[in-house]
Amino acid sequence: EDQVTQSPEALRLQEGESSSLNCSYTVSGLRGLFWYRQDPGKGPEFLFTLYSAGEEKEKERLKATLTKKESFLHITAPKPEDSATYLCAVQATGGYNKLIFGAGTRLAVHP
Amino acid sequence: NAGVMQNPRHLVRRRGQEARLRCSPMKGHSHVYWYRQLPEEGLKFMVYLQKENIIDESGMPKERFSAEFPKEGPSILRIQQVVRGDSAAYFCASSPPVRFEQYFGPGTRLTVT
């Protein structure tokens, strides 16, 4: 069964303290891995798509990387406005287009 | 370019009533998806539609739930005879024809009393 596990469940950082969020996945065949950001009471906001092992994408203080079994979302020198829940999802080949989501990591960045 | 639009944003229904949730995809997007987020749980896929066709409904409960995406107008998720367990946030997403990333709307928060 296709599955996504994110860790840690929650992370508290001081402003400027870099860290990484983990997304482990098992899927029959990976079409793509997606990272989203979700603020309370809002819909998920698309951040990145990664398609193959070794691929990296960057956006401001965020960098996403992909291996054959996991993805990392690296946050460099975070600011309080980076506080949100970060969601990882996979799309399997042969599974039409549905996204299978992990439970998310709740990130809190304190000044 | 307007994003995915959903209405209503909040919906309160009594047990046994019907709930209708609407979703207008982004301009140029022909694929629509519905997901449900139960309290303290992750997002779960429900159904994937293209115009006038249901492509994948593997996540839809077998009873009381239905979805459509007509040739004209928004996609509709319909829940008949709602129960308290249907209380959740329902999100619609859309994607363009040849890309895989999905863009989400703000959600409809359904409360069943």
Image: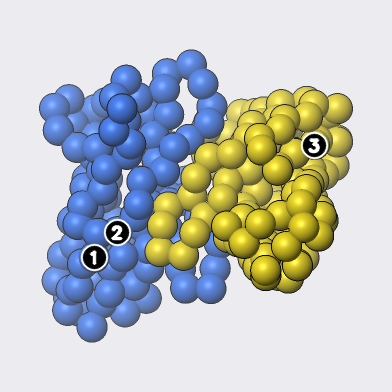
Chain colours: A yellow, B blue
Report the residue marked by disc 1. B10
Chain letter of the residue carrying label 1: B
**Counting residues from the N terminus, which is met first, the one under dot 1 or under dot 2?**
1
Check whether the beta carbons of the residues at disc 1 and disc 2 lie within 8 A of each other: yes
Label 1: element kind: strand
Q: Residue B25 location in percent, x, y?
A: 30, 34
In the image, are marks 1 and 2 on the same chain? yes
* Disc 2 residue type (three-letter): Thr
- Image-quadrant location for residue A55: top right
Chain letter of the residue carrying label 3: A
Check residue A65 in the rendering and tell me which mark sits there, or answer none: 3
* Disc 1 residue type (three-letter): His
Q: Is residue A59 left or right of residue A38?
A: right
Q: Is residue A93 visible?
A: yes
Q: Residue A58 location in percent, x, y?
A: 71, 33
- Residue at 24% x, 71% y: name it: B82
Query: Closest to the observer: A24 or B61?
Result: A24
Label 2: element kind: strand
Give the foreground label among 3 and 2.
3
* Disc 3 residue type (three-letter): Thr
- Between the C-alphas of marks 1 and 3, the distance is 37 Å
Q: Residue A85 location in percent, x, y?
A: 59, 60
Q: Quadrant of the N terminus of chain B?
A: top left
- Between the C-alphas of marks 1 and 2, the distance is 5 Å
Check residue B24 in the rendering and tell me which mark sits there, or answer none: none
Report the residue marked by disc 2. B108
